[in-house]
Amino acid sequence: MKTGPEHRTRAERGACASAAIALAATLMLFSHDARADSPLVLTLVPKHVFLARGFSVRMGDYFALEPAFLFVADARPGSRQAVGVVRPIAGVGGSGLGVGVAWQPFWPIEGERPEHVEGYVDILPISIEVHIQRMYGPTHWRSATYLGPQLSLSVLFLKASAGWMINATDEHDRRAQFGIGGGF
């Protein structure tokens, strides 16, 4: 009896997906020691590493929990800089990882720049990432590994995303992936 990943039953794949979703949910729900002024961004390493909560309803994996780890280099108060993003993804129909950058191209109110980097990472409306996702569930996408870029736009706590995914083993299987959600 073969037991490799290509021979897993639907129940085994569902169990793996449930475990990944449970881990992401636990991270997001039990990390309630966020600063009072930002319920969406948690400080993990002051001035350098942050955890932003997020979720999406998307094509391909339906509903996905996708917290983002934000990595900030040496930050100067009031400066605009790119922030590194690593985003684990756990969804109903797939899971994966996104890696990219986010930045703030403008300030909502001129002259209202944050004094500390914690205030800066609360407002990062643009994120460009490269995603690798394994689709395995009940969606109309094939059970395969997809790669591609994704652009996310965030306003307050709402988020929209658009991506272009290509099957890693069949270059003719290309799909657009649109999503709407909350968080970063």
Image (cartoon, rainbow, N blue to C red):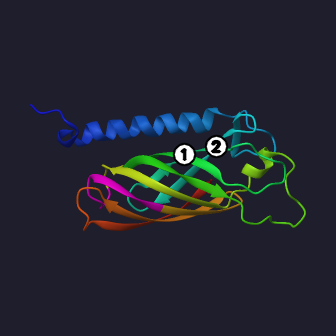
Residue in front for this viewpoint, 177 or 83: 83
Residue in front for this viewpoint, 109 or 60: 109
- Give residue 8's position: percent from left, percent from top: 21, 39
The image shows residue 1, relative to residue 154, as above or below, that is above
Q: Amino acid at mark 1?
A: Val
Closer to the N terminus: mark 1 or mark 2?
2
Q: Which residues are magenta?
A: 139-149
Q: Which residue is mark 2?
A: 71
- Give residue 167's position: percent from left, percent from top: 29, 59
The image shows residue 135, relative to residue 160, as above or below, that is above
Q: Is residue 14 left or right of residue 100?
A: left
Q: Is residue 158 left or right of residue 57?
A: right
Say if mark 1 contacts mark 2, CB within 8 Å: yes
Cα–Cα span, label 1 and label 2: 8 Å
In this view of the protein, can residue 93 be seen by the observer?
Answer: no
Checking the image for residue 175, the label placed there is: none
- Give residue 133's position: percent from left, percent from top: 38, 51
Q: Residue furthest left?
A: 1
The image shows residue 135, relative to residue 12, as above or below, that is below
- As helix, strand or loop, the secondary structure at mark 1 comes to strand
- As helix, strand or loop, the secondary structure at mark 2 comes to strand
Checking the image for residue 86, the label placed there is: 1
